[in-house]
């Protein structure tokens, strides 16, 4: 008999038989990729490459114009009692000027008492002291600390006034450090949480360490590869953070699928080599299909035409691909090398605490090789009453999804920063006192004409959509002008958007034909327009290719369609949770944030492709086990019960790890990452419980043999093996007739 004909089985079998070669190749690959990546360095995209439409065109012109932009800073001076004309107010302003100048870092200081004064509010109780940092703007954040200390000293000497600093350099210093600390803390928390869950699931230290080690080496190798590919398609700085998140999730999942099947086969009395062969031919194949499906989902982000999404696609595809390769090659080699030592219980006291009691985690979930008792108890009523189960579970999912219809996207603003950050409050106070001054509309024109720019100013201010300040900068070559105009509204509301429309549609055509408009508001509008235009392409691409992959893998039209529908339902439910928590604010007191009333504009598309891909992990793994039992002769109902009970331990452990890791991101300071963490965690939890434990088995029970329906005109599709050809394991043949 010829066994293990699928590619995963052949690769896994070879790796197990040539374990030292397989491990050497893997280590050499990771070390080589890491070394080369470190030598080359990851190429980060230019700022305009993250923009779309007219904003991107403006940014591209500015990028090549050679503007030398100093780092601008602002000191807010505000009083509730006195005005700028009061001696006490003037004394505080003078103190600020002396103090910041004494640091040797500030120049071009402007106050309300100069010939060309800095802005003052109508009630004269608030003003801005404007200055620039000396030297290169790129290093200003490293040199701004003495200036911040000087301003704090002025505040201490004038307690009756509000004296606070804000600006690009100070924000990079204070906010950037806080966010960096957040990510370090998240990464430090993710690893011990993952190890703890794996240790509780396996009860063995090596079995817990191997999945994490494989995931981390896959991330390291993929990061090295990213440095090479980024030379052709530059990426956003956040790409490596996303790679860590996805790489840890899929890397651990794939190892779990593989190791648990290998241990299950050994528990049946198989030899070490035979157990690895069977795991390679079954779980290994599921890993391969799942990985390809995830990669297809991630590839959909290329169709957005947005640089950030394209970079995310590049990074996540590399890390998933590397994790799949490692799972199919290095993992079976490690299992072959370690053998029975994988069950060794080092740190026995700790393991005993985690698995204490007669009914342990592993016995409950069935992670040691048996079928899960808990999921068996859940499955019995689900399979006995499938219609009721579908109605209740489906109704709950739809109810969760309904709020998602009200999802309102919005750009990232200073309100994103949650927690006790004084500089955020300073920015908000400045924006309240001088609306539109922080985020003006920016008009970019080549070969500028002074008279035309003056006409632009007159019409813009006369339109009622704009206000001072109106500033014009010309590049050193004199061929590009950058015009900043204060925009009314909040920057994210209809008032601001109407101003951009008026500027682009009416004012510019009449004064500066061919000019481009960028800025925060314009950039957000262009991004939303791009997402609206490409969303059908992305969704269609992901759904169609996932459908084709599932159709070919399982030779079933029903399985492919149902998998797509269930995954869409999971994503819709995640959208609903996001709206409930972050847009309607029902989770403010629990998580500790202040709602902005919107969901970050890039998040819905990102969540769709990520969640669709990750949900396929569980679906493919469970369906592969069900199809394996069905192909060996089980009735569909029995195969469903057996497949879900025998995979419940893997799915539950993997889901717990993903939920825990994603939930850590809900503790970060930026609202976007809170939303991402909650959205991912909620979706995975819903998918691994309501969908996989109730809706999937209930719908399969209702459909019976129709689950495997394939039209005759598709009979040419290849027949792929879902199990290992081991005849002594065949159950009794099913008695009902097949419909295919």
Image (cartoon, grey):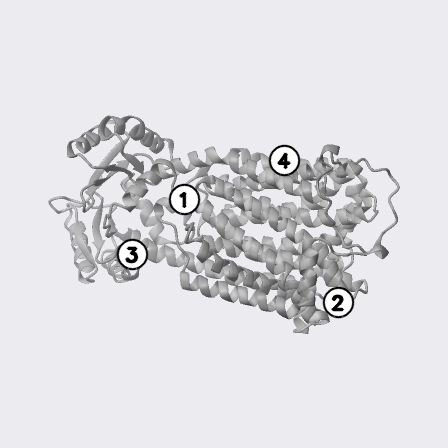
Mark 2 element type: helix
Residue 43, compared with residue 615, is above or below; it is below
Of marks 3 and 2, which one's residue comes earlier in the chain? 3
Of marks 4 and 2, which one's residue comes earlier in the chain? 2
**Few, some or many C-alpha atoms within 10 Å of disc 3 (few <14, some 14-19, many ≥20)?**
few
Left or right of 435? Residue 591 is right
Residue 558, compared with residue 309, is above or below; it is above
Disc ID at residue 398: 4
The CA span between labels 4 and 2 is 46 Å
Between 70 and 432, the residue placed more toward the observer is 70
Of marks 1 and 3, which one's residue comes earlier in the chain? 3
Q: Where does the image place residue 37, in percent across and percent down from the top left?
A: 45, 61
Mark 4 element type: helix
Residue where numbered disc 1 is placed:
412
Q: Where does the image place residue 671, in percent across and percent down from the top left?
A: 45, 48
The CA span between labels 3 and 2 is 58 Å
Farthest residue to the left: give it.
Answer: 115
Residue where numbered disc 3 is placed:
138
3 or 2: mark nearer the eye: 2
Between 548 and 145, the residue placed more toward the observer is 548
4 or 2: mark nearer the eye: 2
Q: Residue 695 falls in which quadrant of the image?
A: top right
Left or right of 114? Residue 174 is right
1 or 3: mark nearer the eye: 3
3 or 4: mark nearer the eye: 3
Of marks 2 and 1, which one's residue comes earlier in the chain? 2
Residue where numbered disc 2 is placed:
272
The CA span between labels 2 and 1 is 53 Å
Q: Are marks 3 and 4 in contact (CB under 8 Å)?
A: no
Mark 1 element type: loop
Q: Which of the image's four quarters has the C terminus?
A: top right
Left or right of 561? Residue 604 is left
């Amino acid at each position: 008999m010829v066994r293990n004909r699928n590619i995963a089985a052949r690769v896994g079998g070879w790796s197990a038989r040539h374990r030292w070669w397989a491990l050497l190749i893997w280590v050499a690959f990771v070390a080589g990729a890491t070394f080369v990546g470190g030598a080359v360095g990851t190429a980060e995209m230019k700022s305009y490459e993250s923009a779309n439409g007219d904003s991107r065109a403006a940014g591209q012109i500015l990028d090549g114009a050679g503007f030398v932009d100093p780092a601008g800073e602002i000191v807010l001076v505000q009083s509730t009692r006195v005005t700028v004309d009061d001696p006490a107010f003037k004394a505080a302003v003078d103190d600020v000027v002396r103090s910041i100048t004494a640091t040797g870092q500030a120049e071009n200081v402007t106050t309300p008492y100069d010939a060309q004064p800095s802005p003052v509010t109508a009630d004269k109780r608030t003003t801005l002291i404007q200055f620039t940092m000396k030297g290169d703007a790129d290093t200003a954040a490293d040199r701004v600390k003495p200036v911040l200390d000087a301003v704090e000293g002025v505040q201490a000497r004038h307690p009756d006034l509000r004296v606070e600093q804000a600006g690009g350099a100070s924000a990079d210093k204070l906010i950037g450090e806080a966010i960096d600390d957040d990510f370090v803390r998240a990464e430090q928390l993710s690893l011990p949480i993952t190890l703890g869950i794996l240790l509780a699931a396996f009860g063995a230290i090596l079995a817990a360490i191997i999945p994490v080690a494989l995931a981390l080496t896959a991330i390291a190798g993929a990061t090295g590869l990213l440095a090479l590919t980024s030379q052709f398609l530059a990426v956003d700085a956040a790409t490596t953070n996303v790679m860590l998140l996805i790489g840890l999730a899929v890397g651990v999942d794939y190892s779990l699928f593989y190791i648990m099947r290998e241990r299950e086969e050994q528990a049946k009395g198989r030899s070490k080599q035979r157990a690895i062969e069977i795991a390679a031919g079954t779980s290994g194949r599921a890993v391969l299909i799942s990985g390809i499906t995830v990669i297809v989902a991630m590839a959909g982000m290329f169709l957005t035409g947005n640089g950030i999404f394209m970079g995310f696609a590049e990074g996540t595809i590399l890390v998933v691909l590397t994790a799949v390769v490692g799972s199919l090659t290095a993992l079976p080699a490690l299992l072959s090398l370690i053998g029975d030592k994988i069950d060794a219980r080092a740190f026995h006291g700790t393991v005993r605490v985690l698995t204490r009691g007669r009914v342990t985690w592993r016995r409950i979930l069935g992670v040691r090789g048996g079928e899960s008792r808990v999921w068996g108890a859940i499955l019995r009523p689900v399979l006995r009453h499938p219609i009721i189960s579908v109605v209740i579970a489906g109704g709950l999912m739809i109810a969760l999804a309904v709020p998602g219809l009200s999802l309102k996207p919005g750009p990232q603003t200073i309100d994103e920063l949650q927690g006790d950050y004084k500089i955020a409050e300073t920015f908000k106070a400045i924006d309240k006192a001088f609306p539109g001054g922080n985020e003006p509309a920016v008009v970019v024109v080549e070969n500028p004409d002074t008279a035309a720019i003056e006409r632009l100013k007159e019409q813009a201010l006369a339109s009622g959509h704009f206000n001072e300040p109106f500033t014009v900068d010309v590049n050193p070559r004199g061929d590009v002008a950058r015009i900043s105009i204060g925009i009314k509204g909040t920057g994210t509301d209809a008032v601001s958007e109407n101003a951009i429309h008026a500027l682009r549609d009416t004012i510019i055509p009449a004064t500066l034909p061919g000019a481009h408009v960028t800025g925060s508001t314009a950039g957000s509008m262009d991004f939303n327009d791009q997402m609206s235009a490409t969303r059908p392409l992305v969704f269609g691409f992901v759904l169609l290719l996932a459908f084709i992959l599932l159709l070919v893998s399982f030779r079933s039209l029903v399985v492919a369609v149902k998998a797509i529908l269930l995954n869409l339902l999971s994503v819709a439910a995640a959208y609903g949770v996001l709206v409930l928590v972050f847009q309607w604010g029902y989770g403010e007191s629990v998580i500790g944030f202040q709602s902005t009333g919107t969901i970050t504009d890039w998040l819905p598309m990102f969540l769709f492709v990520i969640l669709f891909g990750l949900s396929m992990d569980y679906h493919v793994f469970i369906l592969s086990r069900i199809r394996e039992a069905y192909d060996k002769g089980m009735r569909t109902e029995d195969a469903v019960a057996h497949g879900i009970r025998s995979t419940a331990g893997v799915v539950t452990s993997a889901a717990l790890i993903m939920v825990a890791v994603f939930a850590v991101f809900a503790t970060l300071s930026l609202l976007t990452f809170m939303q991402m963490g909650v959205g991912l965690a909620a979706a995975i939890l819903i998918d691994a419980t309501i969908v996989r434990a109730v809706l999937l088995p209930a719908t399969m029970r209702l459909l019976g043999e129709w689950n495997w329906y394939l039209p005759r005109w598709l009979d040419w599709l290849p027949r792929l093996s879902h199990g290992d050809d081991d005849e002594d394991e065949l159950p009794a043949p099913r008695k009902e007739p097949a419909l295919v």
